[in-house]
Amino acid sequence: MAFVDELRTSFERGDPFGAYSKRPPETHTLDYAIWRFLRVWAHAPQPGADHAVLLRQIARWKQGRLFVGRLPTTLARYNATTGVDVTPAGDLIAEPFLPSWLANESIRPAEGIDNKPEMRRCLESIPAESYLKSLGYENWQSQAQKEAAWLTLTAPQGTTTLVALPTGSGKSLCFQLLSRFGTGLTIVVVPTVALAMDQWRSAREVLQHIPDLNPHYFAANDPNLNPDSVVSDIREGRTRLVFTSPEACVSGRLRRVLEEAARKHQLENLVVDEAHMIESWGAYFRVDFQMLSMLRRTWLQMAEGALRTFLLSATFTNQSRELLRNLFGNDGEWREFVSQRLRPEIAYYLHKFSSDDARNQAVIECAWRLPRPAIFYTTEVDDARRLFKILTEQEGFERVGCFHGETPPSERRSLLARWRGDDIDVMVATSAFGLGVDKADVRSVVHACLPENMHRYYQEVGRGGRDGATSLSILLPTDRDIKVAKGLAPTLLSEMVAQQRWESMWQSREVVSEDRHIWKLCTDARRTGLLGTRTWNENIRWNKRLVLQLLRARKLELLDIEYQEAVDADPTEWVTVRLHFPPSSPSIGGSISEQRDEELKAAHQGLMQMLDYINGERPICRILQKIYGTETQRVCASCPGCRREKRSFAYCPKLEYEVSATTRPTCTVITEVPNPLQKSGAALLRSKLRQIIRHKKIICFACAPSNHDLMLNLFAQMFHETDYDLYRVDSLPSEPPFEIRPDEVIVLLHIGRLNSEALDLRAGEEMVHMICSGVNYLDINGRYPGEAEGWQLYPTLDYWL
């Protein structure tokens, strides 16, 4: 039965009769809106506030007339609040949402802000190799995703790889593929417990058909998780993928077992997801994010250079990339793949209120009128609790969750499961929920606060529209919120306190090599006047902040970190450093004051960018492009600045990225290669290609676009989906072009005719042109391709093999 028919029948009967259909694949359609409504009605037969808002969503997403007859009285009583009505002819209608506080926003009254979502992300998927199907995917989302995944999969040992892909573009596939093709352990470090749980749940679904992978997440205080079993599975090699926090790695339960894994060469990959947070959180209150770089160096030495490191994010500034390279890329090859495009799906709206009461009333309006699923953000935990109470107790909504930094781990797990399972329509949350939590169909993100910088705001806005369709962002700050945001500026050590802390740490020193200025310092040393005034953990964090501040000022190098447990005493951490300053100097605090001032200035600039936006100084798309670099593709679905300039969404360009420069590769021509278009040729070619991959270790192949599906099918017949043979097959020409790195060998197949684009290509270390039988390859002078340039000719594939 069609969804519209089910809806009408349900209204005629007065209940949904439990016959609602399977969830529609597209999450921005009328069918999907009806499915959500009927599903809620089936689970909660007595219609209430949640049902009424979902019914409004149906009315706003309909196309043309939608005859429903009449509504049950239990639903009709909400019509005035939700702006819904049924015409005398029985058609469901709803007035557009255009609140009075957006009256000056250049919005068409007949459309409002809650029209049916439109697909905004461009279609750039490409057919995938068979091994991707083992993870449930038929296609790469884009050529950019394929290039990012390939760069991670083929990363040499000891390298550090930075990958930037826009939100919703599938960067998680990078570390999922690392574990799928790996035989050892991949550790994924994430900034929040919510993200660890979310990534773990997603990995379990995606990797369920890969034998012996057994993903885990590690959280020390989760009553539903046995940390001993996770440690045991790591130690015994019963898991190949673990999600955890930087604290667990640097100073927590995982420290020892990961060191053991590194010594045994079982620790293959260290991945830091949302790695842009290393710059901000890692410098101030999550210092183990930056300390992780030192621990990674220790693991690299224990693993004799076999560890690979990956830094992933959707949003890297140039400053962030430079910092990460200084922290993680100074002892091995540094590699980057950067493809950054502003989100085309987000429609931005804002209004600044003078009072909390007026703003709260606007938030309530949004709760009754905006499409769901929706996220309502606050900055402070108390505000989240207060808003949750208003929505549930005052307004009568039941399908609401509340997620913040003080939410217990077991409740977090439950909230995330219900959110992903479509059992929660509105999540009230702080930034603890904001990083990376993946739900494709979020249609509205409301900020009942002012984020302290544009990074946080853009990350939280990015929870919406991940299915590629339009999503609403409503920013509703007050004067009080501006004060709160200013109060979130980082606290850095003053010159005097920095000097006192350094002197106390220096008194704890142990010499390693005085000639080379290498010392060990204890991180729990207490400065003068502090004894008894700070907790042990807080004292350590401040000492680590000082060490990191000295590192960022290039006053020292971090060489190692040791974690020593003691009987009947607190454990101690020792950092090994090489000093670039006289340690007994009385002006050490002053020597880092310039660096300190620059960091405080940068933090202040982040808030000023938010204020520029809410004061209408500049369109947000221009602010964001300046933050993330001029090479970032600027796309704006709709923001106040662009609306004032009468600029509207035009189109979404394909993701761009840099490709390697032209090289002077060795070129080889092989003729009379078995032709897959001829009888028995396909089987013979499969056999030869298998030899090329397994014995010659060549794994890059390309052909004309007209033969791409043929070659993908050929490779799929050669290898089972869960085999460990890695390869790629590309079409040439392609737009954007695929990447051939200077150290790669590529086989170019000429099937049916010579591919002139392939013959003109100059890339990689070696190019092998395999010309299939039946293809005329001689020119009018009787010369084979490249003969004039001295290309090597092999008359048969066997001879070359």
Image: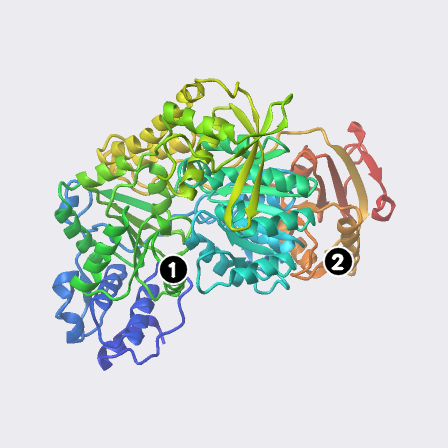
Instruction: Find residue 353 and report its horizontal and vertical position in percent.
Output: 15, 42
Q: Earlier in the sequence, mark 1 or mark 2?
A: 1
Towards the viewer: 651 or 64: 651
Whether residue 565 is visible, yes or no, is yes
22 sits to left or right of 375 = right
- Residue kind at label 2, given as amino acid type: Ala
Whether residue 732 is visible, yes or no, is no
Do tag 1 and tag 2 residues touch (Cβ < 8 Å)? no
> Which label sits in the foreground, 1 or 2?
1
Towards the viewer: 476 or 653: 476
Q: Secondary structure at mark 2?
A: helix
**Where is mark 2, residue-wise?**
682
Q: Which mark is residue 412?
A: 1
Q: Is residue 233 above or below residue 634?
A: below
Towards the viewer: 334 or 390: 390
Residue located 17% across and 61% down the image: 82
Residue located 81% across and 44% down the image: 671
- How dense is the environment of label 1, judged by Cα within 10 Å: few (below 14), some, or many (20 and up)? many
435 sits to left or right of 322 = left
